[in-house]
Amino acid sequence: MKVLVILLISLLSLSFSVKDVTDDISTYLKAGNAQSLATTFADKISIKILDVEDLLSKAQAQALIEDFFSKHKVKNYTTLHSSFINTGHQFITGNLETNDGKYRVSILVRGNIISQFRIENDND
């Protein structure tokens, strides 16, 4: 019984340490602010921006997103779904509206750090 109580307390403390970063990410995407967005990146991030897909350093990923934002001026970003899929893992999907169309954004957050980031064409 003692072990069960300790386990339960440990699990609860872990769940409270995970922060929902959806609002921060949404703010950075709405502003087209790659520099602030990159502050939430892991040191190595799996990234796909349109046809470019790779495992990049934080600085390389920031440069790739800055290039995307310079070519596609952001009008708005809307989070469609945000869910915690495991302790410390959060999945976020949204729509990014730009001057030349709509894009689907998918983000995997592990422990408040973005480990996967995707922007894919949604101009159907």
Image: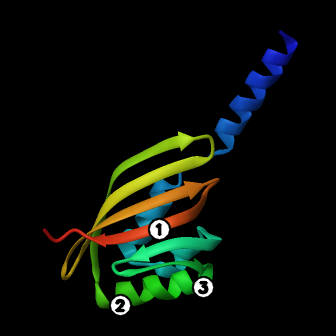
Q: Position of residue 99 (x, y in %)?
A: 20, 82
Q: Where is residue 50 in the image (x, y as percent from the top left)?
A: 33, 78
Indicate the quadrant where residue 94 lies.
Answer: bottom left
Quickly name the residue at label 3. Answer: 59
- Gap between marks 1 and 3 measured at Cα: 14 Å
Give amino acid for label 1. Phe
- Which SS class for mark 1? strand
Q: Do the residues labelled 2 and 1 touch (CB within 8 Å)?
A: no
Q: Residue at the spot x=16%, y=71% of the render?
A: 123
- Gap between marks 3 and 2 measured at Cα: 16 Å
How was this image coloured? Answer: rainbow
**Quadrant (top left/top right/bottom left/bottom right) for the N terminus:** top right
Left or right: 78 in relation to 110: left
Give amino acid for label 3. Ala
Indicate the quadrant where residue 83 lies.
Answer: top left
Q: Where is residue 13 in the image (x, y as percent from the top left)?
A: 73, 34
Q: Residue at the spot x=35%, y=81% of the render?
A: 51
Quickly name the residue at label 1. Answer: 117
- Gap between marks 2 and 1 measured at Cα: 18 Å
- Which SS class for mark 3? helix
Q: In this view, does 15 lie above or below 47?
A: above
Q: Which of marks 2 and 1 is in front?
A: 1
Give amino acid for label 2. Ser
Q: Earlier in the sequence, mark 3 or mark 2?
A: 3
Q: Position of residue 17 (x, y in %)?
A: 68, 43
Q: Which of marks 2 and 1 is nearer the N terminus?
A: 2
Other residues around mark 3 within 10 Å, as few (<14) / some (14–19) / many (≥20)? some
Left or right: 60 in relation to 73: right
Left or right: 97 in relation to 32: left
**Quadrant (top left/top right/bottom left/bottom right) for the C terminus:** bottom left
Quickly name the residue at label 2. Answer: 70
